Amino acid sequence: MALSAGMVVPGAAGLLAWSPRAHAAELSVDLTARRGDVTMIDGTTALMFGFVQGSGISTPGPTLLCQEGDTITVQLKNELSTPVVFHVGATNVRYPVNANDEIEFSFSAPPAGTYLYYDDQNNGVNRIMGLHGALVVMPAGVSDRPFSGGPQFVRQYKWLFSNVDPAWGQAVRNLGDYHVGSINPESFNPRYFMINGNAYENTHEYNTELMGQYGEPAYVRMLNAGGIVHAPHFHGNHVEMVVINYERFNAPYKNKDAVSMFPLDVREVVYPFKTPPDAYPPVSSQQIQHFPMHCHVEMSQTAGGGLYPHGAHAPIIMGQTPPNEPDLTRDANDLP
Ligand SMILES: [Cu+2]
């Protein structure tokens, strides 16, 4: 069956609109594990795997958005000629499906937070080949806090980091899907570095670039699905560290400008959208200011003969709101 309304933000979307419900819901989603050619920022074609909703190929998989208390049913079809696993990181949810087979399973939403769902087989090779996506669990009945007692935000974003080594895809193209089991993870030479499936400057769209008026904090949920360390570095403002791998911190939060993440790590931070405190001459709140977030890991900046800035990089625009706004105004009791 089709997915229920409100559960899934389509494609690689990062800006998460959420209309909370006063009651738990039964949600469902159809996913297909499939392979296909994905065009990189420089025109190179890479064969990738993905958890796809609908036809074609796209990676990461759809962002699954739900709230605490919900039950999620997944119809998972595996079109690959190799087994696939659907695992939700930091939980016991783990369902294998045979090559060219189909399964259905249900699980309860884990506690409010940000989770990577991924294929955990072959020492990370399946995940890095593209079998991953994000699951975001909101607290029941709340639209503007990540968990009860957490910080209030105006907008929230998902930034899913991934990397691509086209040589792995070429090996699979030549030898077959099952060859993922023979790829040595040590052979990883990533050349492309993405957020939400896009390298800069394709990240210049409202789902990934942070936008807001001064005084409108953004909550950024960062996940590292790649095979390297990422160190997103924020310009303009420091970020407040709210959650580090499911450990929640209390205000006043630690402030950081670069946030290191090992593969599979998850970080939740607030980008406060304050007028830059040390700027001279002082910045007025009428001024539109552009800043970057870029990954400070050297490989992300120099791979592919210096493809930077076509790497893990996202724009930040202060003093301007995104063209599409999440609906944060509806009362939970008014909703179906
Ligand atoms: Cu920097």
Image: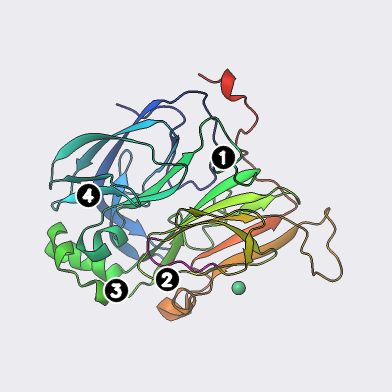
Residue under label 4, please give it.
Answer: 85
Magenta region, residue range: 259-264
Q: Residue at coordinates 33% horizontally, 40% vertically from top-left? A: 53
Q: Quadrant of the N terminus?
A: top left
Q: Which quadrant of the picture is home to ligand 1? A: bottom right
Label 1 sits on a secondary structure element that is loop
Q: Which residue is mark 3?
A: 188
The colour scheme is rainbow
Circle 4/circle 2 CB separation < 8 Å: no
Q: Callout 3: few (<14), some (14-19), or many (20+) C-alpha neighbours within 10 Å?
A: some
Residue contact between numbered discs 3 and 4, judged by CB atoms under 8 Å = no
How far is the residue under mark 3 from the one under mark 4? 21 Å
Is there a contact, CB below 8 Å, between mark 3 and mark 2?
A: no
Instruction: Find the distance from the CA under tag 3 to the CA under tag 2.
Output: 13 Å
Residue under circle 2? 229
Rendered residue at 62%/63% (across/down):
254
> Of the residues tagged 3 and 2, which is closer to the observer?
2
Kindly identify the amino acid type of the residue bearing the numbered disc 1: Ser
Looking at marks 2 and 1 on the same chain, the residue that comes earlier in the sequence is marked by: 1
Q: For the residue labelled by badge 4, is the local secondary structure a helix, a strand or a loop?
A: strand
- What's the distance in space between the residues labelled 4 and 2, CA to CA? 23 Å
Q: The disc labelled 2 sits on which kind of residue? A: Val
